[in-house]
Amino acid sequence: MESRVSRTEFLQGDVIFEMNAPAKHIYVLEDGELAVTYGDNPETEIGTILQGESFGESALLIGGKRSATIRCETDVTVQAFDSESIQGIFKQWVDGKRMCQCLLIEMINSNEFRRKSALSDAKEEPKSAALTDLVNSAVGAIATLAQTVRHPDQILEGWEQGNAFLVTGGHATIQRGNGSTDIGSDTCLGASQLILGKKPSDAIAIDTISHPLAGWFIPITDQYNKLTELNKGLAAVARGIAHKTARSAVLS
């Protein structure tokens, strides 16, 4: 089940891929630093990618075109994973696919928050169609009914058992990093922290659940441990997503 991987070097100033380009590979930064820019005129830098972090994850499960431009701030070395081979792995292992979907849902939410902050755009935009598709795909294969969470302690209990919570309805306020965030449907809580072997409760504080949260507790820790045995390359991608998402939440 090992995915195809190649190692490539780029020079400072090189562009690895541009916004709206076809997405065929997923990358993990092995050495160096990358800038993430969004928009055309002018491009606005919305973040950086550091050693060990992943990028180009839209190719992992979403497909379509690139949502940003990645430029080398220094000379860099990357590992590139063929997205088609990863798709093939997920056809054989649905639980692993669902684990990565949860990571991507967290990452998309975090990226959207940072992008809006960087662009200083107060206009309310519709929710990403890719995000909604990810959530629908993640819950579509789950036979059990969604659970309802009325108290933060119920989320904490799920985290202690190595599960992330995929929110499909309701409303709550959480403290994450330096500020508070209102969350609702199409949100995942705890996946990145669990992948990194940390307690989600140390990074995410649920202040209030104003409307009971509906959703699924999805195993994350056990699935990631299995992934490290089955496919070290894809495990590196999953960990890279978790690293970037956790750092983005703090920076936000």
Image (cartoon, grey):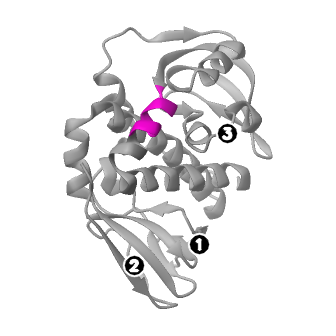
Q: Residue at x 21, y 55 (%)?
A: 85
User: What range of the chain is rendered magenta?
Assistant: 219-226
**Disc assigned to residue 198:** 3
Mark 1 Cα shell of 10 Å, populated few (<14), some (14-19), many (≥20)? some
Label 2 – label 1 distance at C-alpha: 15 Å
Q: Write down the residue under mark 2.
A: 16
Most foreground residue, 117 or 213: 213
Horizontal side of 209 relative to 102 (left or right) equals right
Most foreground residue, 186 or 78: 78
Please identify, in this view, whether the residue under mark 1 or under mark 3 is nearer the observer.
3
Can you give x and y, in whole percent of width and height, for residue 170 in the image?
Answer: 56, 18
Can you give x and y, in whole percent of width and height, for residue 20 in the image?
Answer: 33, 68
Mark 2 Cα shell of 10 Å, populated few (<14), some (14-19), many (≥20)? some
Please tell me whether mark 2 sits on a helix, a strand or a loop: strand
Can you give x and y, in whole percent of width and height, for residue 206 in the image?
Answer: 73, 25
What type is the residue that disc 3 sits on? Lys
* 88 is within the stretch colored magenta: no
Please tell me whether mark 1 sits on a helix, a strand or a loop: strand
Label 1 – label 3 distance at C-alpha: 29 Å
What type is the residue that disc 2 sits on? Ile
Q: Write down the residue under mark 1.
A: 45
User: Which one is earlier in the sequence, the residue at label 1 or at label 3?
Assistant: 1
Q: Residue at x 64, y 22 (%)?
A: 160
Q: Residue at x 30, y 70 (%)?
A: 21
* 223 is within the stretch colored magenta: yes
Q: Residue at x 32, y 52 (%)?
A: 60
What type is the residue that disc 1 sits on? Glu
